[in-house]
């Protein structure tokens, strides 16, 4: 349940417009949104000037169960146990040699057996 947990932990959904925007009898617009992470749907009714008139949510069953068991802080704690964490690279000390923890972008240097060097037009591979 990482997707729904992420929505709960971040306090936001990953909305996409789902289907057509429907013109209602009073000329307002009904917009249906679907969260691609937790499958929650949201229906808004907008006035033609963009003013929000109503909003309705329908949570998916897994997300509903998740939000009953976890508040936002607990959801973040849960995610920290489920997603692999890595250490941030250490900063290079001033005046020291290359930092092995940080890869720097360099000009391409051809090495023996380097196929990319052979494929570059106008360049001859070094022996």
Image (tube, rainbow, N blue to C red):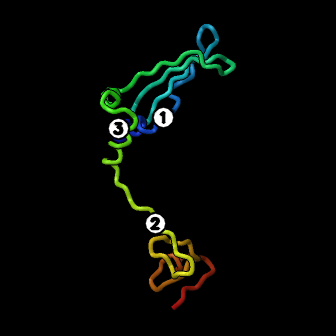
Mark sitting earlier along the chain (1/2): 1
The one nearer the camera, 99 or 33, is 99
Q: Residues within 10 Å of mark 1 (few under 14, many from 20)?
A: few
Q: CA distance from mark 1 to mark 2?
A: 29 Å
Q: Which of 113/103 is in front? A: 103
Q: Disc 3 to disc 1, how far (Cα)?
A: 15 Å
Q: Position of residue 91 (x, y in %)?
A: 51, 69
Q: What is the number of the mark on residue 74?
A: 3
Q: Which residue is mark 2?
A: 89
Q: Is residue 32 above or below residue 13?
A: above
Q: To which quarter of the image does residue 63 belong?
A: top left
Of the image marks 3 and 2, the number of the one nearer the N terminus: 3
Q: Residue at x 45, y 21 (%)?
A: 57
Residue shown at 34% from the left, 50% from the top: 83
Q: CA distance from mark 3 to mark 2?
A: 28 Å
Where disc 2 sits, the SS reads loop
């Amino acid at each position: 349940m990482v997707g729904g947990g992420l929505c709960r932990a971040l306090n936001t959904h990953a909305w996409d417009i789902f289907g057509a925007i429907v013109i209602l009898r009073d000329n307002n617009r009904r917009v249906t949104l679907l969260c691609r992470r937790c499958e929650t749907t949201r229906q808004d009714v907008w006035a033609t000037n963009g003013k929000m008139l109503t909003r309705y949510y329908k949570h998916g069953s897994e997300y509903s169960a998740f939000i009953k068991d976890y508040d936002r802080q607990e959801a973040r704690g849960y995610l920290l146990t489920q997603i692999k964490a890595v250490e941030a690279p250490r900063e290079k000390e001033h005046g020291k040699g290359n930092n092995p923890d940080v890869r720097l972008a360099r000009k391409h240097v051809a090495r023996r057996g380097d196929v990319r060097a052979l494929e570059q037009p106008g360049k001859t591979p070094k022996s």
